[in-house]
Amino acid sequence: MAKDPAFLFYSSDFLTGVSDLTFEERGQYITLLCIHHQKGRLTQKIIDIAVPNATADVMAKFKQDDQGLFFNERLEAEKEKRAEHAEKQRQRALKGWEKRKKEEATRDATANATALPLENEIDNEDRDIVEYPYRGGEFLKKWNDWKAHRRAFDKFKYTPQSEKAALTKLQKLAKSEARAIAIIDQSIEKGWKGFFPLKQEDEPKTNVMPTPEDVLKVFPGVLKSFSAD
């Protein structure tokens, strides 16, 4: 872990603690505190170089360990508390990240299962209950798109009975898988809650030759003229 670049500085406690020090001694004290924070416990050599004339009152603010190194007890306590807090924050962030990662993986798995069904696959909740009128993979995918649209649009979820009724109505309107898919697309595009016949402009156009009877209905005199000739 990188060295902590800061430590808590309690201004009120500091002013109380240095009330018996001159301004020069206060400068010595804060200098040694900063070096202690950056380099750890102080050797006599480091003190002599940094503060050659450190007074006895300043040095009284430091204790000496078994190895002869000088340290400020309050500073080390604050460093330890700050390090513990930082570690707790790091662990909390890791747990939060792991939780979000699992939730995203679950959402992705659910979305993939809904958006990309296997051919002839039936939702688990409807298995052995709902029978689909068309079993092509494109229709099954489009039907799942329709159910997702209803859930997003008005938070509606089919029961097995209502889903069977909707499929029956769709089949009666469509008569074919291709038209059923077109009707579903139309309802999703329009934001409808149900199925309706395709708009006239969407009806498939076919090139069918008119019968003589059709011609007679439109031009009643044509057939007679042909007969006269």
Image (spheres, grey):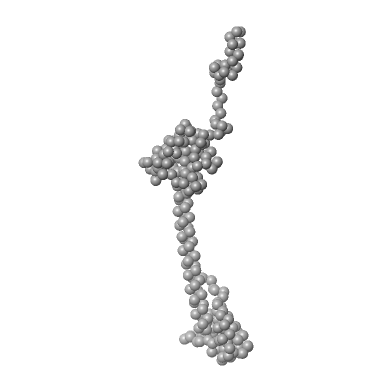
Which residue is at the front of the view, 58 or 129? 129
Q: Which residue is drawn at 45% across and 51% down?
A: 109
Residue furthest top as drawn: 228
Vertical arrangement, residue 21 with respect to residue 77, above or below? below
Res 35 visible? no
Q: Where is residue 177 in the image (x, y as percent from the top left)?
A: 47, 34
Q: Residue at x 51, y 34 (%)?
A: 197
Residue furthest bottom as drawn: 56
Q: How many labels does the image show?
A: 0
Vertical arrangement, residue 132 with respect to residue 12, above or below? above
Vertical arrangement, residue 25 with respect to residue 208, above or below? below
Location of residue 20 by image quarter: bottom right
Location of residue 210 by image quarter: top right
Vertical arrangement, residue 210 with respect to residue 229, above or below? below
Q: Name the image quarter holding the C terminus.
A: top right
Q: Which residue is drawn at 54% across and 83% down?
A: 42
- In the image, 201: left or right of 127? right
Res 150 visible? yes
Q: Position of residue 39 (x, y in %)?
A: 55, 79
